[in-house]
Amino acid sequence: MANTTSGTTTFEKGFSISDIVEESYERIGIQGVSGHQLRSARRSLNILFQEWGNRGAPLTKIGRSDYQSLSNKTQEGTPSQYFVQRFIDKVTITLYLTPGSSEAGNTINYYYVKRIQDAGAYTNDADVPYRFVPCMTAGLAYYLAIKNAPDRVQMLKMLYEDELQRALQEDGSSSSTYISPKVYYPEA
């Protein structure tokens, strides 16, 4: 007799914030949560989402001190470096070398990390790709253990980091990427 499968792949669609909170509390050995524990978990989940935003995408860039040490920030040419400043309401990317008139019409293509929506109501679905559900649950369990089960913190932190690394690797490319500017030298 042949084994059958469900034929569906929509599990994450029914994985609400309350399901994530309940699963995370169960991982630290607490069942039947309500009231303050639910609010605390939702707050911790929103902090977890902010932490993911801080990790950002794996991009190569120059830091503030490297940018500040550049002697002529207005020098024109084909950009080869960039500096990122994060503000409360915006992110600014500064290119170096500054594109000149000969570079008019060039386009910069980039990937960015969109801020994850807050957890909101317990009936909401989480605003994360399905492959991040395991690390989201592990991360919330780790955050809740800090507050409620200190004896499980180290184990849950290792599990969370492992789950997060696995999810982030799926977002990346398995091949090396090299970016170099196109440089033209005028003939003498």
Image (tube, rainbow, N blue to C red):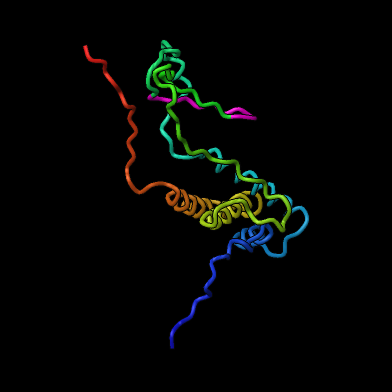
Choose top left, top right, bottom left or bottom right for residue 125: bottom right
Q: Residue at x 42, y 49 (%)?
A: 169
Does residue 115 appear to the left or right of 171 in the view shown? right
**What stretch of residues is rendered in magenta?**
80-90
Q: Is residue 120 above or below residue 184?
A: below
Q: Residue furthest right?
A: 35
Residue 185 seen from this side: yes
Q: Is residue 84 magenta?
A: yes
Does residue 174 appear to the left or right of 34 in the view shown? left
Q: How many marks?
A: 0
Q: Residue at x 60, y 41 (%)?
A: 115
Q: Residue at x 55, y 26 (%)?
A: 92
Q: Is residue 3 above or below residue 112?
A: below
Choose top left, top right, bottom left or bottom right for residue 108: top left
Measuring from the top left, give residue 53's x and y in whole percent.
Answer: 56, 40
Q: Nearer the viewer, residue 33 or 66?
A: 66
Q: Quadrant of the N terminus?
A: bottom left
Measuring from the top left, give residue 136's x and y in whole percent.
Answer: 57, 53
Residue 151 seen from this side: no
Q: Residue at x 57, y 29 (%)?
A: 91
Q: Nearer the viewer, residue 93 or 61?
A: 93
Measuring from the top left, give residue 182's x and y in whole percent.
Answer: 32, 27
Q: Residue furthest left?
A: 188
Q: Residue furthest bottom?
A: 1
Q: Is residue 143 above or below residue 180?
A: below
Q: Nearer the viewer, residue 15 or 100?
A: 100
Q: Quadrant of the C terminus?
A: top left
Measuring from the top left, give residue 23's x and y in whole percent.
Answer: 62, 62
